[in-house]
Image (spheres, helix red, strand yellow):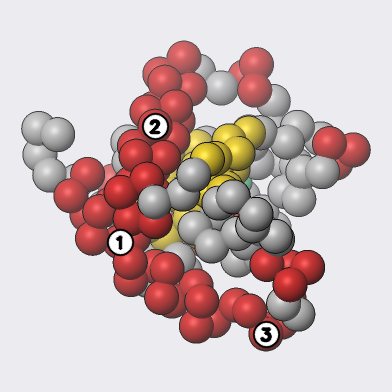
Amino acid sequence: MSYILNNIKKHTGCILCEEAKKNDDRKNYILYRGTHSFVIMNLYPYNNGHLLIVPNTHESDIDKLPADELTDLMKVTQASVNILKQAMKPEGFNVGINIGKSAGAGIPEHLHIQIVPRWNGDTSYLTVFDETRVVPQLLEGTYAQLRPYFEKLRTPGS
Ligand SMILES: [Zn+2]
């Protein structure tokens, strides 16, 4: 753990780097830490189970992310989709990267992959509920639901 934490370059002011530096994963909604990537819940979810897959490296430019880190990012994305399938039984997914502010990137300085589980007829939480009302209980419940699956990902040899 300390090895992984030390590997993260300290970029103050970047919310994703700041969250990654903290120790209390539950409190910070970090579900998983891999070799080159981590998984954190979106605090303003479009849908329940909205996850961000984030490279440990603070990088905005997809061209500058080394091949092994890109591979790890996609492997963790794949594992996360599979976990969401098992845990939440969605009927589809939106998986994507917003590059640049004009593309809707909320944190353009630190590349990340968004995974949004979708159900037939769903509507964005943020349009259904008031943004400030949704968050704490919903996020805690979803964290508790997903975390055991991500803990199994850590099993040596898997
Ligand atoms: Zn960052």
Residue 18 at least partly seen: no
Mark 2 and mark 1 lie on one chain; the one further toward the N terminus is: 2
Please tell me whether mark 1 sits on a helix, a strand or a loop.
helix
Residue that sits furthest to the right in the current view: 102
Instruction: Specify the quadrant of the image occupied by residue 132.
Output: bottom right
Nearer-the-camera pick, 15 or 47: 47
Which residue is disc 1 drawn over?
A: 147
First reached walking from the N terminus: tag 3 or tag 2: 2
Q: Considering the numbered disc 2 on the image, is that residue within a helix, a strand or a loop?
A: helix
Q: Is residue 128 left or right of residue 34?
A: right
For the residue pair 18 and 51, the one nearer the viewer reads as 51
Q: Position of residue 69 (x, y in %)?
A: 44, 25
Quadrant location of the C terminus in the rendered image: top left
Residue 49 location, x and y as percent?
49, 58
Q: Secondary structure at mark 3?
A: helix
Amino acid under label 1? Arg
Q: Which residue is mark 3?
A: 133
Q: Earlier in the sequence, mark 1 or mark 3?
A: 3
Please identify, in this view, whether the residue under mark 1 or under mark 3 is nearer the observer: 3
The answer to whether mark 3 and mark 2 are in CB contact below 8 A is no
Q: Compared to 103, does 107 lie above or below?
A: below
Residue flagged by tag 2: what amino acid is it?
Gln
Residue 125 or 30: which is nearer the viewer? 125
The response on whether ligand 1 sits within 8 Å of label 1 is no
Label 1, label 3: how far apart the Cα atoms are: 23 Å
> Residue at image x 74%, y 72%?
128
